[in-house]
Image (cartoon, rainbow, N blue to C red):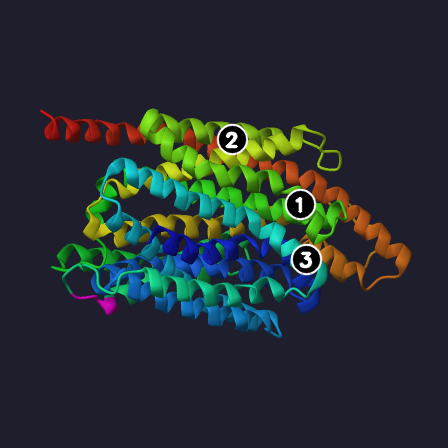
Amino acid sequence: MLIAVMLAFLPVVFDMTILHIAVPALTQALGASNTQVLWIIDIYPLLMAGLLVPMGTLADRVGNGRILLIGLMIFGAASGLAAFAPSAGMLIAARMLLALGGSMIMPCVLGIIRRTFEDDRERALALGLWGTVGSAGAAVGPLVGGALLEHFWWGSVFLINVPIMLVVVSACYMLLPRTEPTTAGKWAFGHAVLLLCGMISLVYGIKAGFAGKQAPAITLATLAFGIAMLALFARRQLRSADPLLDLSLFSRPAILAGIIMAVVATGALAGVELTLAQELQYVLDKTPLQAGIFMIPIMAASAVGGPIAGYLSNVLGLRLLASLSLFISATALGLLAWSDFGEPGVIVPVLLAVLGLMLSVGLTASSVAIMSSVDASQGGAAGSLEATGYELGTGLGITFFGVFMSAVFGHMIALPPDLSPDLGEQAMRSIGDTYLAADQLADVDAAALIEAGKAAFARTHSVLLSTAASLIGILSVAVFFVLAGYEGQRAADEDNVHP
């Protein structure tokens, strides 16, 4: 069963990062604006953030295996639609369908692991192996994407999911049990709609307000609507005999710390990956395959981080392991911020490897803490909360980094004096828009504009990576204090079992 759920999880995490390397190619092919590119990337994690909790609870009600198989089939079909999308709008719609399938897969994977492994040590090692698939799959995504784009069109990064899904669906159907215990109670569809509307409205309001693309009145109205929906959802949960989400889970230190880690760490990492992918291709003129190869140290280190975390969590304790891994990650990012990627030497690959290893260890440690804090019957719900943190962090990370990148880039770029105002405004939005504006100029003028864009983005990446380092550094301190309650509770439980 562990093999089956690891195979099921692989395409979902694969899809989180494989698109990053294809951003320049699809931007040019679809003529997508900077705003459309951000929506193409982050509509997937943002929509999943609203769907994961309802789907995790539904899986506990009707069976993780059944929901998992349905999600896999939806994900495969949506991948085929995304591969042949003729416009940016159609690609965004296909990504929404991908989010539906992914939201059914992720909580089921963790729920099945929680039900299968009752022993704490075995569960820690199982989650470590699961973490390996998650970290390695996300890290290998850019390399596979680069290899595909070297020979095929941008849609191939989606089309590759179709044959993978055919194999995974068959494997899961054969390996997963036909019957499994479920949680009694109804699945409140109305509550799920409230949560989905509230999450999407709140996140969109934050996105629109931070980007400054909407009128303040519209932004405030959207935020108010989202908060009202979430407040109504919380009220319904507290009064319901069969709540969609047990809000008491948030009172457990391990779950709270795990969600905080998921949001901040994955948000920072997603922003860093997007920054690196664009710098390597736009500024250093590397091919997609070369850019993917450049990130191999992150992939290799992430692949071994899960088992290491599963072992060390039993040796050092989760509090020390989680905090230390995040602190080292922040240090590596801070050093990368001022490194020269044009002449990486030995230092840059080592720093990338340290970053991948430590973030993988830290996030796997949080999974161990979360899944050890709930009964097996709550595995799907707890898994959905953790996955929501990952997806919300990824979506907000892409949004904040994308908008922050655009603002810093627009401030840094020195436009040629004879450039028309319209093209100048377009070129200031992002490095991708700079290339689109250059396509409308003569060769000499285009070359001057592109050089100005490259110089501005090289300075921009230092600011972005420094910001990510600061966020993860603050997180490492917060996690150290929050997990103090978790270790105290675990010690008390041990005393009760062995008086």
Q: What residue type is labelled 3?
A: Pro
How far across and how far down the image is residue 129, in percent?
A: 40, 43
How far across and how far down the image is residue 75, in percent?
A: 45, 67
- Would you call the spot at circle 1 few (<14 residues within 10 Å), some (14-19), or many (20 or more)? some
The quarter of the displayed image where residue 464 is located: top right
Question: In terms of sequence position, does the residue under pointer 2 or pointer 3 come before the other?
Answer: 3
Gap between marks 3 and 1 measured at Cα: 17 Å
Q: Which residue does the image show at 24% across and 50% down from the upper left?
A: 115
Q: Which amino acid does label 1 sit on?
A: Ile
Q: Name the residue under label 1.
A: 293
- Residue 371 drawn in magenta: no
Give SS at disc 1.
helix
Q: Residue 330 carries which label?
A: 2
Is residue 162 placed above or below 319 in the rendered structure? below
Is residue 381 placed above or below 32 in the rendered structure? above
- In the image, which residues are magenta? 186-190
The quarter of the displayed image where residue 474 is located: top left
Q: Quadrant of the N terminus?
A: bottom left
